[in-house]
Every structure is written in structure tokens, then in C-alpha cells.
């Protein structure tokens, strides 16, 4: 890619993290490198009577310390996590939105569950007491666009705003839309996303897929690409990223930031029973073509890592088809957080950019009998020069997305 | 007869619609537009719901349009108290 291409590209200049691995980039990255898990017994409600009792939860998050008091009773926990991460991301980018034209800033986030915890509380009031007991804020707190809307209002960002709901793939789709906006001239886009659906109603909805692990051991329940894979554990949180127009970022001295969004593609699986193959392989190929890169230009793959034997085999087959057997290092730091749905892929992109920055691939944790076709990075971080990472994400129901991030410089 | 005071309103607004560092409800706010204090129509709907449940009076949704200042809100709520005796 030439310098002029980088100028019109989309760069990530700020990252905010509220995840089971910690609050803030530094805590998150340290946990990831140390293999420190954020998965434990669910504490947001008593999970004793549920078949899934472990999840990734954000440690030490206090809305009172991180969210404007006015917004706390008006918004769900999932939005609280995003508002805090958005503040951190803007601070990290060194951007003061108050000094920028409001119509040149946009907000595009992903959400898979909306405000289920808030919604459950209001539904309990409806069924126990009656309609007049349902709070007025239910109307704005639980729908998918609430986070985007609150970030937009709080920071005075009136450019194109939206929310993408594509389960775990939605985070890449949101960043893909952010890149599209940045390249078309919008100055900056607050993007990424969070999810937080660890309440009885939310967990029950997740159980319906049959994809969650019921293994009663938090260290053995979520083992993607392992012979003992049994499903996944859910988690809460995610990451908010500041995506800027490359020229604007360079002009204000932010350079390429953490790196560029070099390529992106989305696909959708054929219906169950179809003889056509899953969308992942062609989505990866399309993302590489969009980035004008060859498979050999990718230094590491952050896997979707669904944790079910059939989905893991399909992902392994797609990676192997594009990169060859053990042809590229593969990792899944989400083994420390569980799958975060709308927040999962943004956190993976953030982690991938930090990996490129520091030249180290964080490990997949807990896996002891890995798929022999994959060069899965296990146990310890692996230091190697990294320029580009491929992030994969699949959402329940067929959503598929792939994104290439890293430096736009060839060498 | 029950009466509803400005302090009752302050307490309710703070607990149901939140306060932040930019809001000072302690001063002479009786005639300050609620919108300027940061409370929109949704906040007033929420307030109306709490008043109805706490005091057993009826406040139609349209009444919220008349609750534009703390004084007007307190007066309206007291008038509703009077109708139920």
C-alpha cells in the first residue's frame, strides 16, 4: 500500500477496554500476556439453578466512578461499560470532541443483546405490579441502539450513527462500517462495542442455542480447538475503538495510531442442510483481497474460537485452506474472557493491534490437546515480528466476518 | 391533605433521573426550566410514574407537557392531590 492509500485509509488511534481481563488497555494487555483469566463463577446473580454458572465478568467496575450520574439510572450495564470505554478511548486518542465539528464525528457500535438486565428488571415490575410500574427509561435503555445514542449525545457526535446486531460477528461489521465512514471523509468514528447479558433472562436466552458449555469447571469449560471442546462460556464487556480518517489523523500528529484497518469482508452461511460450504473461507479470502494482501502477508490469526467441535473444525478447515497446514500462528485470547458477543471482536481487534505494536502473540489458555492442523499459540506469549493480524468472528445464525489490521507499511 | 413540596421534587428527580456534576438542585430552582436543569420529557414521564405510584394520584401523560419548571410541576401535582381530596 502506498502512502497515498494510507492517507485515505482508516486508522485506529484510541482504544478503551472494559473486559473480564481488566479495565483499560494496560490492565487488559497485562492480563492477556500473563494468561490471567477473567472467568469465574457468575456474581451478578445467583447462578446455582442454571446449567451454566461461569462467565467472564469485568472486575471492579463501578458505574458511579465511571459514568455520569445522570446516565446511570437511564441506561443498562452494557451501556455503562461502553460509556466508560468510550471515555478511555477518546482520552487515549488525545481527542477532545468538543473542539471538532459535530457532524464530522460518527458512532457505530455492535450489540447482540441490548439492555437485557435493565429490561428484565422492568418486566418483573410489569408482571408483578402492572404496566404503570414500568419505568419510562425502559423505552430507551434496552434497545440495541442505546449505547450508540448515549455516546453520540454525551460527546456531541452527530454524523452517521448506527448499531449492528450480528452476534459475535457484529463487532467486525461495526468496525467495517466505521472504516467506510472514515474513508469517505468523516473525521472520526467511535466504534467497537460491548455486551453484558449476565442476568437470568439474558443467560436463558443464550442457553437456547445449545452452544454454551455446561462443564462444571471454569478452567475446563471453554477449550476451543481442543479434543475436549464442549462449547463456550459467555462474558461481558468489550472494547471501544476510535477510528479516524488517515489524513486527519496524520495532520493532527497521530500518525497511523495503533495501525490501520487494512481489509474487511462479511459473509453469511448457507442454511442448515445445504451442501454449500460455510462462508468463512471465502470471507477470509475477500478480506485479504480487500486489503490487497496475500495469505503470506498475515503474521497471526485471532480465531473466532467458537469452542464447539463442529464449528472449531469448520474454522480450522477454513484457516488451513487459506494458509496451509500449520501455516500461520493462531491464537484465541478470548479463552480468558469467554465470548463477549458484540464486544468480542472489538476486543480481539484491540488485542491484535497491541500484539502488532509489541511484536508478541498472546497465548490461548487452557487448551492441552490442540487441533494438530493449527499452529495454536499455547501457554506462553510468542515473540515475533508482527505487521498484520487477521481477526475472525462468527455470530450465531450464520454471521461471518473477517478483518485485517496492522501497519500499512510493507516493511 | 398531603402536599408536595419543592424538596420532594428535588429528592425524586435525584433518585429516579440522576444528578451529575453539572446539576445543582439545591439553589433557587423553582422557575428554572427543567430542560435547562437537564431533565427532558422522558425524565418527567418517569417522575410522573413515581408520583402516581407513591401518592396514588393520576397524572396523564399529556400533563408532562405542562411540567416545564419545578414550580409548575409542584403546583400541578398539588392540584391533583386536591382532586382526590
Image (cartoon, coloured by chain):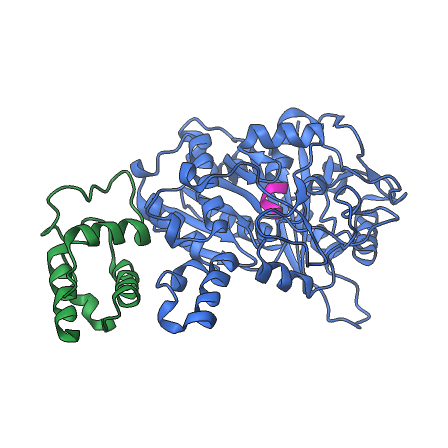
Residue A216 x/y as whole percent: 78, 50
**Chain that appears blue:** A
- Quadrant occupied by the C terminus of chain A: top right
Residue at screen point 40% across, 73% down = A130
Tell me residue B79's x, y (percent): 12, 68
Q: Residue at x 29, y 64 (%)?
A: B54
Q: Nearer the viewer, residue B31 or A29?
A: B31
Relative horizontal placement of residue A210, taking residue B31 as reference (left or right): right
Q: Which chain is green?
A: B
Residue lying furthest front in this view?
Answer: B1
Image location of residue A191, percent across then percent down = 49, 46
Residue A170 visible at all? yes
Q: Nearer the viewer, residue A265 or B22?
A: B22
Indicate yes or no whether the magenta region holds residue B7. no
Magenta: main secondary structure equals helix
Q: Position of residue A173 (x, y in %)?
A: 57, 53
Q: Nearer the viewer, residue A42 or A281?
A: A42
A319 versus B59 height, above or below: above
Q: In the picture, which quadrant includes the N terminus of chain A?
A: top right
Q: Which of the 4 image quadrants contains residue A237?
A: top right
Task: Report if residue A398 is visible in the image.
Answer: no
Q: Which residues are magenta?
A: A344-348
Say which quarter of the image contains residue A252.
top left
What residue is rendered at 45% in x and 49% in y?
Answer: A184
Amino acid at each position: 500500500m502506498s502512502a497515498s492509500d494510507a492517507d485515505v485509509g482508516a486508522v485506529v488511534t484510541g482504544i478503551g477496554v472494559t473486559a473480564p481481563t481488566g479495565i483499560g488497555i494496560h490492565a487488559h494487555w497485562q492480563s492477556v500476556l500473563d494468561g490471567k483469566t477473567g472467568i469465574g463463577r457468575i456474581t451478578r446473580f445467583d447462578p446455582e439453578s442454571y446449567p451454566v454458572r461461569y462467565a467472564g465478568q469485568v472486575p471492579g467496575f463501578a458505574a458511579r466512578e465511571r459514568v455520569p450520574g445522570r446516565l446511570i439510572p437511564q441506561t443498562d450495564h452494557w451501556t455503562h461499560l461502553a460509556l466508560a470505554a468510550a471515555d478511555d478511548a477518546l482520552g487515549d486518542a488525545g481527542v477532545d470532541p468538543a473542539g471538532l465539528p459535530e457532524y464530522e464525528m460518527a458512532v457505530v457500535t455492535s450489540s447482540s443483546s441490548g439492555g437485557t438486565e435493565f429490561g428484565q428488571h422492568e418486566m418483573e415490575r410489569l408482571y408483578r405490579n402492572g404496566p404503570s410500574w414500568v419505568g419510562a427509561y425502559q423505552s430507551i435503555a434496552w434497545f440495541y441502539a442505546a449505547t450508540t445514542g448515549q455516546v453520540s449525545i454525551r460527546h456531541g457526535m452527530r454524523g452517521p450513527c448506527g448499531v449492528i446486531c450480528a452476534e459475535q460477528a457484529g463487532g467486525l461489521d461495526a468496525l467495517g462500517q466505521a472504516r467506510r465512514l472514515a474513508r469517505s471523509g468523516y473525521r472520526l468514528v467511535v466504534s467497537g462495542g460491548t455486551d453484558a447479558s449476565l442476568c437470568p433472562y439474558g443467560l436463558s436466552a443464550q442457553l437456547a442455542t445449545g452452544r454454551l458449555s455446561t462443564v462444571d469447571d471454569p478452567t475446563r469449560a471453554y477449550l476451543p480447538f481442543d479434543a475436549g471442546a464442549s462449547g463456550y462460556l459467555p462474558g461481558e464487556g468489550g472494547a471501544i475503538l476510535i477510528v479516524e480518517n488517515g489524513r486527519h489523523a496524520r495532520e493532527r500528529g497521530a500518525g497511523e495510531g495503533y495501525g490501520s484497518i487494512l481489509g474487511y469482508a462479511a459473509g453469511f452461511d448457507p442454511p442448515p442442510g445445504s451442501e454449500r460450504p460455510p462462508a468463512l473461507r471465502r470471507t477470509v479470502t475477500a478480506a485479504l483481497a480487500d486489503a490487497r494482501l496475500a495469505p503470506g502477508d498475515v503474521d497471526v490469526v485471532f480465531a473466532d474460537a467458537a469452542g464447539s467441535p463442529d464449528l472449531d473444525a469448520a474454522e480450522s478447515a477454513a484457516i488451513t485452506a487459506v494458509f496451509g497446514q500449520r501455516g500461520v500462528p493462531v491464537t484465541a485470547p478470548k479463552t480468558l474472557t469467554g465470548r463477549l458477543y458484540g464486544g468480542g471482536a472489538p476486543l480481539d481487534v484491540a488485542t491484535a493491534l497491541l500484539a502488532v505494536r509489541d511484536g508478541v502473540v498472546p497465548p490461548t489458555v487452557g487448551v492441552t490437546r490442540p487441533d494438530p492442523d493449527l499452529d495454536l499459540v499455547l501457554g506462553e506469549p510468542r515473540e515475533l515480528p508482527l505487521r498484520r493480524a487477521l481477526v475472525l468472528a462468527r455470530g450465531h445464525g450464520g454471521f461471518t466476518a473477517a478483518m485485517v489490521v496492522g501497519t500499512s507499511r510493507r516493511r | 391533605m398531603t402536599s408536595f413540596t419543592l424538596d420532594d421534587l428535588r429528592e425524586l428527580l435525584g433518585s429516579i433521573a440522576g444528578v451529575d456534576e453539572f446539576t445543582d438542585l439545591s439553589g433557587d430552582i423553582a422557575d428554572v426550566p427543567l430542560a435547562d436543569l437537564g431533565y427532558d420529557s422522558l425524565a418527567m414521564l418517569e417522575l410522573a410514574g413515581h408520583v402516581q405510584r407513591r401518592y396514588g394520584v393520576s397524572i396523564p401523560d399529556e400533563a408532562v407537557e405542562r411540567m416545564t419548571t419545578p414550580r409548575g410541576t409542584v403546583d400541578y401535582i398539588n392540584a391533583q392531590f386536591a382532586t382526590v381530596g
